[in-house]
Image (cartoon, helix red, strand yellow):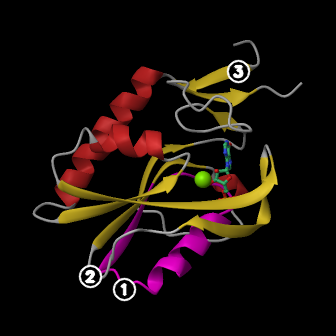
């Protein structure tokens, strides 16, 4: 597609996820992880990552949205769909597509506190550090990405491009 510049090929993503999966298996040895997948963008990442893992995993899903236009998030985050089962005493691994300003993750961490999990760690596909406004304690990062709007492998622009098997930057013109 002519308006896209591929940043991470499908192969590169799979290789990096393999490394991350091994690291997570090592770090959570003997435990059961509650993977909390943040809809919708992170579903692709969560599936592909955890299919490479050997650790016992339970899945939870949550949907939050930060309203704004297509290529930048706005100031307000809302909860759209909450978790289903109790995470009290569980070891929760938040799996998210990206930390950009950090606003969404800050909201999510604050929201989850009331459910008293045993631990919370954060695993993201992409870290757009340059844009950070709210400091977020990220534990696992697949890719540090430049300050560009990306699509593919779960990332969308107005719901388009999510199913591309690679991560690409939208060319500005
Ligand atoms: P936040 O600014 O860290 O709260 O990120 C808010 C949300 O904006 C993320 O969860 C993504 O859904 C979206 N977002 C931020 N940067 C990008 C991007 O480059 N491509 C697609 N979505 C993005
Ligand atoms: Mg998101």
Please identify the quarter of the rendering in which residue 106 is found.
bottom right
Mark closest to the chain's N terminus, 1 or 2? 2
Q: Where is 108 relative to 19, above or below?
A: below
Q: Quadrant of residue 133?
A: bottom right
Taking 13 as reference, is 93 above or below it?
below
Is 116 magenta? The answer is: yes
Task: Looking at the picture, tell me which residue is in the foreground, 18 or 56.
Answer: 56
Q: Are marks 3 and 1 in contact (CB under 8 Å)?
A: no
Image-based side of 57 in relation to 65, left or right: left
- Which numbered circle lies on residue 116? 1
Q: Position of residue 163 (x, y in %)?
A: 54, 28
| Dot placed on the residue nearer the N-terminal end, 3 or 1 | 3
Q: Residue furthest top?
A: 2
Q: Which quadrant would the N terminus be assigned to in this image? A: top right
Instruction: Look at the image and give the residue range highlighted in magenta.
Output: 97-123
Select label 3 or label 1 by which is in front: 1
Q: Residues within 10 Å of mark 2 (few under 14, many from 20)?
A: few
Q: Residue furthest left?
A: 30
Q: Position of residue 109 (x, y in %)?
A: 51, 75
* Residue 89, disc: 2
**Pointer 3 local density, CA inside 10 Å: few below 14, some 14–19, many at least 20:** some
Q: Quadrant of the C terminus?
A: top right
**Label 1 close to label 2 by CB (< 8 Å):** yes
Residue 36 position, x and y percent, is 40, 61
Q: Is residue 55 above or below residue 76?
A: above
Report the disc number at residue 4.
Answer: 3
- Give the spatial CA distance, label 1 vs label 2: 6 Å
Q: Could you tell me if the residues under marks 2 and 3 are in contact, i.e. CB atoms within 8 Å?
A: no
Which residue is outermost to the right?
A: 173
Q: Is residue 36 above or below residue 98?
A: below
């Amino acid at each position: 597609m002519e308006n896209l510049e591929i940043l991470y090929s499908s192969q590169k993503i799979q290789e990096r996820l393999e490394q991350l999966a091994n690291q997570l298996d090592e770090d959570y040895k003997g435990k059961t992880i509650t993977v909390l997948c943040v809809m919708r963008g992170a579903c692709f990442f969560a599936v592909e990552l955890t299919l490479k893992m050997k650790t016992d995993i339970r899945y939870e899903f949550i949907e939050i949205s930060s309203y704004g236009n297509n290529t930048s998030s706005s100031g307000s985050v809302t909860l759209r769909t909450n978790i289903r089962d109790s995470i009290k005493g569980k070891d929760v691994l938040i799996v998210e597509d990206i930390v950009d300003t950090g606003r969404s993750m800050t909201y999510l961490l604050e929201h989850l506190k009331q459910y008293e999990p045993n631990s919370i760690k954060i695993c993201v596909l992409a870290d757009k550090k340059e844009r950070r406004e709210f400091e977020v304690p990220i534990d696992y990062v697949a890719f540090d990405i430049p300050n560009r709007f990306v699509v593919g492998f779960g990332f969308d622009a107005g719901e388009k491009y999510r199913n591309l098997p690679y991560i690409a930057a939208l060319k500005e013109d």
